[in-house]
Image: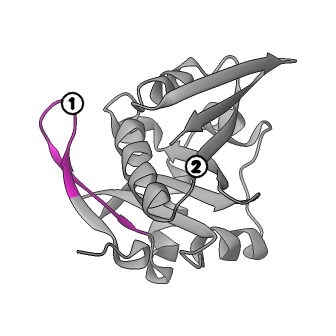
Amino acid sequence: MSIEASTYAAADTLRDGRRIVVRALAPTDREALLAAVGNVGQNSLYRRFFGFKRQFSEQEVDYYVNVDFDRHVALVAVMGNEIVGAGRYVCGDPGQAEIALAITDAWQGNGIGTLLVRHLLILARLQGLKHMQAEVLAENTPMLKVFAQAGVSLKTSNRSGVVHVVMDL
């Protein structure tokens, strides 16, 4: 059985037992993704983008929504009809990709980041990737904990308040 990243969908369970769907981001998710960004607070956006960011240009929105599912894979976590989290990886050097996540503030702490990482790792392994990496602000201990719980070998280095995380797949 083959899994196709562009049509990926899986039901999963949050820590409290509620069911959630993790699926491939679709171009039709544009408005729902923008609404989700509106539910991410300034502090969370700062930790994600390493600076304050409230507006995204049309070009940036296009980049985040229109992924090729080859070099750029994006998944969303959906509760009902609402996107409550998103994760993606973008391939760089052969066998490597950079991973990033964002969870709406109201849904942080429910295990959504952990689920997104787990599902992204499934797709990355199927794609033949060997390493996933991320840059995380040292103060962002919840995200560092998500990566530490990914169930893979993890290496970190801290430089000037930014932790470079490498996960071996």
Residue drawn at 46 percent across, 37 percent down: 105
Residue drawn at 80 percent across, 38 percent down: 51
Q: Quickly name the residue at label 2.
A: 130
Residue drawn at 50 percent across, 65 percent down: 127
Q: Is residue 150 above or below residue 49?
A: above
**Residue extending furthest right?**
160
Displayed quadrant of residue 11:
bottom left
Q: Quickly name the residue at label 1.
A: 15
For this rendering, which residue is in front, 111 or 10? 10
Please state the extent of the stretch shown in magenta in the rendering. Answer: 11-24
Crowd rating for badge 2 (residues with CA inside 10 Å; few <14, some 14–19, many 20+): some
Q: Position of residue 166 (x, y in %)?
A: 64, 34
Depth check, mark 2 against mark 1: the one in front is: 2
| Type of amino acid under label 2 | Lys
| Type of amino acid under label 1 | Arg
- Asked which secondary structure carries label 2, the reply is loop
- Mark 2 and mark 1: Cα distance apart in space: 28 Å
Crowd rating for badge 1 (residues with CA inside 10 Å; few <14, some 14–19, many 20+): few
